[in-house]
Image (spheres, rainbow, N blue to C red):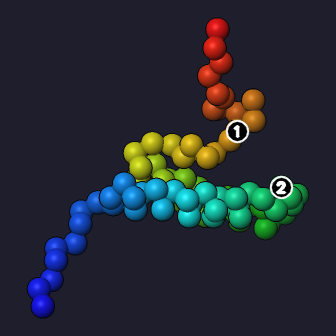
Amino acid sequence: MTRSKPSKQFSQAEIDRFLMAAEALHLSIIKPFISPYYDHYRQTGVPHEVLLKTLRHVTRKKAEFIRWNTAGPVRPQTAG
């Protein structure tokens, strides 16, 4: 039995699966509506930041499923 050499990067199908799993994790982090003044809220920022950095590293772009409010840094382009 011969060993195959591991791939150096994800295939597009693997990236798509990774993005779906990352979106589910993102929603599980941001979905609970808790006060930003307490430890649980502050501690969710750590894994969320790691998730976003990992997505940028693996896909070489920002996560498209992240939606900011209109005052945030990302706003959909409007025609006109």
Which of the 4 quarters of the picture holds residue 3?
bottom left
Q: Residue at x 29, y 60 (%)?
A: 9
In the image: residue 62, left or right of residue 28: left
Mark drawn on residue 68: 1
- The span from disc 2 to disc 1 (Cα, nearest Å) is 17 Å
In the image: residue 30, left or right of residue 65: right
Q: Which secondary structure lies at badge 1?
A: loop
Residue 18: where, in percent of width, then height? Answer: 48, 61
- From this viewpoint, is residue 46 visible? no
* Marks 2,1: beta carbons within 8 A: no
Q: Residue at x 63, y 64 (%)?
A: 25
**Which numbered disc, 2 or 1, marks the residue closer to the eye?**
1
- From this viewpoint, is residue 30 visible? yes
Q: Which secondary structure lies at badge 2?
A: loop
**Quadrant, the N terminus:** bottom left
For residue 71, above or below residue 65: above
For residue 27, above or below residue 6: above
Foreground of the two, 12 or 75 = 12
Amino acid found under the numbered disc labelled 1: Trp
Which of the 4 quarters of the picture holds residue 14?
bottom left
| Residue found at the far left of this picture | 2
Q: Residue at x 24, y 63 (%)?
A: 8
Identify the residue under disc 2. 36
Neighbour tally class for label 1: few under 14, some 14-19, many 20 plus, Cα within 10 Å: few
**Quadrant, the C terminus:** top right
Mark drawn on residue 29: none
Neighbour tally class for label 2: few under 14, some 14-19, many 20 plus, Cα within 10 Å: few
In the image: residue 10, left or right of residue 74: left
For residue 2, above or below residue 31: below
Foreground of the two, 56 or 43 = 56
Q: Residue at x 63, y 32 (%)?
A: 74
